[in-house]
Amino acid sequence: MLKKYLIILLTVVIGFSSCIRSSQQPGRQYMADMVNAIPYEAGSANPIYRDGKTNQLAPAGSVARGKYLYPLADTEYIKAASLITNPFVFTKDEIEGEAKHLYTVNCAICHGDKGDGQGHLVQIDKFPPPPSYLNEPLLSLSDGQRYHTLMYGKNMMGSYASQLNHRERWLVLSYVKSLQDASKPSATTVKTDSTKTK
Amino acid sequence: MFNNIVNVIEFQQNRNYLDLFQIVLFSTFHKIKTTEYYICTEKIRRIMYNCKSLKILCQLIVVILFLSFTNNASAAVAVPDVVATDAAGVAKAKEGMALFKANCTACHAIDKKVVGPALTGVWDRWESEDKLVAWVQNSGKLIASGDPYANKIFNEYNKSVMQSFPTLNKEQIQNILLYIKNPGVAAPVAATPAPTAGTEANTADSSNWLLWALFGFLAVLAILLWNITSKLDKVVREKAGEVVEDKTIVEKVFSKKTYKTLLFIGSILLVFNVFNGAIDLGRSQGYAPEQPIKFSHALHVGQNQIECQYCHTSVEKSKHASIPGLQICMNCHKYVKQGPKYGTEEIAKIYASQGWDPDQSKFVKAPKNFEWIKIHNLPDHVYFNHSQHVKVGGIKCQTCHGKVEEYEVMKQFAPLSMGWCINCHRQTEVKFADNKYYSVFQKYQDELKKGTKAKVTVADIGGTECQKCHY
């Protein structure tokens, strides 16, 4: 009789207890031989390197293939105007497809879809409005200084050097140019000329 | 204390109330017992004499402070207060707001230091309006002229030059000042959008609550009905001539029937859970650990509408979506120092890791490593590539990660099981026409043209081959 009740009790307790799983725990594993990677995975902590990261920068003095080295330091904003020019020639498709997408992802949240400084964060009063691209002084800002701003940030804007690569930065700047040209109805004919500096 | 007062009143009848107060203060402060009191009257007199001189000193300080403040105010820029009913003033403040937002906000905020100083109280800091106007129109010129305050502020901000605004005239600058002093009038109650995630959570809570209430109500009803039927049953059986024993409630609860029911439910649950638990081994669907920084996707993606790729930068370029470094947080959090839910606590963790000093608005220490808890762990023997799915396939992030824009805490939405992958590969249509890469699939192109094939799925182009993902 006692044995019978014990069985009942066990069934009930185990049956109900297995309903509970904490969302704080990843769950159980069974024969996880090929599940957990033996090498260190990207982005993981790493006890071998001195800085504790698996993702390492290229060793000092070496340049990754295709990597662009920006020659100016943070303070050389004025110099950028004459030294830095756009080496790319982008097609209209690239500007309206890829460049627009990059602009929407990275810039439009503050600068607005039209570049007027009225992005969503500005409209909900989370972030102060940046100056409009469609007015001076940004309207006639040189390409080089725009690029410098993307590299190091300016005023309230942070650096986008880690988020965009060399080509993407020029793509975004070309799209900004196209926004500025679109706002000036008289200047539509020189639309792509300004981006083709070389 | 009370004793002291009584004694003092008795003893010092001839003194006025202020003196009385001083004596009480003195006696409590020096812990003089009432018995000692009579002895040290002479001492009290001396102390009171000292107190009087102190009083005079205090009065002098107050007068000097008052004079210095009024003196300062008279020399500074006078900016009037504007009330909401003053139409002309409100119009001016509104113009000021427009100018402020167009020209100043890149570096200045009203009430906090960002790139430049907080602008509230700027009217007290400059000695004359002309100098302030000259500073705004061309700060470099004013610094060169040797103005002491201009040079002080220039040196305080690491000699960074404020942009010149030669186009702003004196009246416009006055309007900006008017707005800075009265920000509430120009933008009456900035209608902050109600936190959508919060309200949704509330409705979810209330619907849950309703569900429980309904459940409780039904349970009570069931018990009542069971009671009634058992009583009726008893009456019927008694009428038929049976002898029915009255069972106590304890006997009823611990009856064989109850045990049988419990055993039945328990064993069903046991089988169900063992089965499910076995399937769940090695998967972590629903895993939502508390992260070291309580980052809310509901706030950043849902309310603020920041694109996923803004932070997960490599999702279109690489196998990994990448967890952003905290330097990306700093793009906005140099300015945003306080969150709506946890205040400054969580954002302070970003600053601590990045070595940012929010008071000085600059980096003071080298950034430290920051480790998040990884949620999505695909087994090592499976290859998965984010860019192939997001960039080439055009799959929305939400397809696999769920409605991240509603997650307060990030969780694993999909089981990430092989069946789940294969199922999607069988159903998902490949964008064949838009992608030149697929022009080599001549047979499918022909069939699509002829109309014999309605769509090409991922499985059709090898999406269910073993070595596509396992190699």
Image (tube, rainbow, N blue to C red):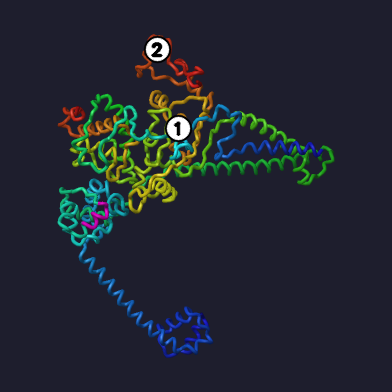
Instruction: Reply above or below: B231 against B399.
Output: below
Q: Position of residue A40 (x, y in %)?
A: 49, 32
Q: Chain of mark 1?
A: A
Q: Which residue is mark 1?
A: A42
Which amino acid type corresponds to the residue marked 2 in the rendered image?
Answer: Phe
Q: Residue furthest front?
A: A61
Magenta range is B151-158
Residue at 31% x, 43% y is A122
Return the mark for residue A51.
none
Residue B196, image x, y percentages: 42, 42
Residue B441 is marked as 2
- Closest to the observer: B151 or B265? B151
Q: Residue at x 15, y 56 (%)?
A: B145
Q: Position of residue B240 (x, y in %)?
A: 82, 37
Which of the 4 image quadrants contains residue A136? top left
Image quadrant assignment for residue B308: top left
> Considering depth in this image, is B424 or B332 the residue closer to the camera?
B332
